[in-house]
């Protein structure tokens, strides 16, 4: 099962960096979301592939046509929070308010019930697993934020599986669609989205995806925007992560969508026998 997802944010929604941290800074940059969304939606039109779009409430409020366009084309909308902050830097009260605002905004504009969620930067860690409780209370039944490999913004090692499973936490249950990985010399290695996808040669991605029974592909509009400005004072590490491989990424994505069959999360959810799925207590 291969699942296609996009996190809908603008090119300047870069985490872990002072000059792109909050709305105050975002106002200083030009938006490139329309052209970048058109590129993605045209490609999906051409291929007929369905995808799930995890959208920022901030984008929805500012550019409701973006969300309406996604919905009118028959795609599923999920929440990527409202303000795109690292969740482990928030407390439960702040996170709860943010996600509630995001769900309400997205539901009002899309007319869809929002039931899927992805954390910015996959920032669910062992120390902020309270997030699952809040998601459940707000009607989210599917999460796609667990990153089971080591990562600067999180990494949730105790999940111990690169496949969908039921997360059980403090009396609640949630369906989890984690990021998948391949094992190389005993290390978990992610390849199917963002900077990893842009950086790695396509023949490796293709080889690993062929071997895998589950692939969670995740992209952002900025992953394919080779004309986007470069934020000046980024750390070298963040600069590499944010800008590497952009020029070839769109053609790589075309090949990926051509070589594999993809479904959205809604279809994947129906294909899984959840009654017999693995249950992971976290
Ligand atoms: Zn994001």
Image: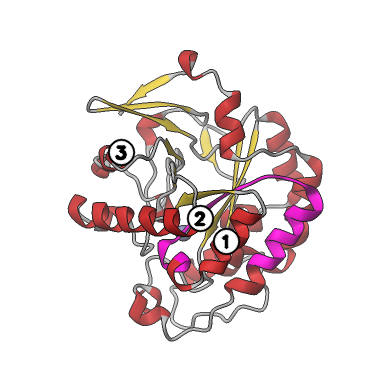
| Residue beneath the point at 37% across and 81% down | 25
Q: Residues within 10 Å of mark 2 (few under 14, many from 20)?
A: many
Q: Position of residue 267 (x, y in %)?
A: 61, 33
Mark 2 → mark 1, Cα distance in angstroms: 6 Å
Q: Residues within 10 Å of mark 1 (few under 14, many from 20)?
A: some
CB atoms of marks 2 and 1 within 8 Å: yes
Res 263 visible: yes
| Residue beneath the point at 37% across and 61% down | 82
| Residue 68 image label | 1
Q: Earlier in the sequence, mark 3 or mark 1?
A: 1
Which residue is identified by label 2? 110
Q: Earlier in the sequence, mark 2 or mark 3?
A: 2
Q: Which residues are magenta?
A: 37-60
At mark 3, the secondary structure is: helix
| Residue 275 image label | none
Distance from mark 2 CB to nearest ligand 1 atom below 8 Å = no
| Residue 254 sits above or below residue 139 on the image | below
At mark 2, the secondary structure is: helix
| Residue beneath the point at 63% across and 46% down | 51
Which residue is identified by label 3? 132
């Amino acid at each position: 099962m291969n699942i296609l997802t996009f996190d809908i944010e603008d090119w300047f929604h870069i985490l872990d960096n002072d000059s792109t941290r909050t709305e105050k800074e975002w106002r200083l940059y030009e938006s490139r979301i329309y052209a970048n969304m058109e590129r993605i939606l045209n490609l999906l039109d051409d291929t007929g592939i369905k995808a799930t779009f995890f959208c920022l409430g901030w984008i929805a409020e500012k550019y409701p046509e973006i969300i309406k366009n996604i919905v009118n084309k028959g795609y599923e909308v999920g929440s990527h929070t409202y303000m795109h902050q690292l969740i482990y830097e928030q407390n439960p009260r702040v996170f709860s308010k943010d996600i509630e605002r995001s769900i309400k905004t997205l539901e009002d504009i899309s007319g869809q019930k929002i039931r899927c969620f992805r954390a910015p930067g996959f920032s669910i860690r062992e120390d902020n697993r309270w997030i699952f409780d809040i998601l459940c209370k707000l009607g989210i039944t599917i999460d796609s934020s667990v990153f089971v490999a080591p990562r600067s913004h999180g990494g949730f090692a105790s999940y111990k599986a690169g496949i969908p499973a039921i997360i059980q936490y403090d009396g609640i249950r949630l369906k989890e669609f984690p990021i998948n990985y391949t094992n190389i010399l005993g290390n978990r290695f992610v390849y199917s989205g963002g900077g990893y996808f842009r950086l790695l040669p396509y023949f490796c991605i293709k080889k690993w995806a062929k071997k895998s029974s589950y692939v969670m592909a995740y992209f952002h509009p900025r992953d394919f925007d080779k004309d986007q400005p470069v934020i000046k004072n980024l750390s070298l590490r963040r600069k590499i992560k944010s800008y590497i491989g952009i020029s070839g990424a769109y053609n790589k994505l075309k090949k990926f969508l051509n070589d594999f069959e993809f479904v959205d999360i809604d279809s994947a959810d129906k294909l899984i026998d959840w009654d017999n799925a693995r249950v992971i207590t976290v």
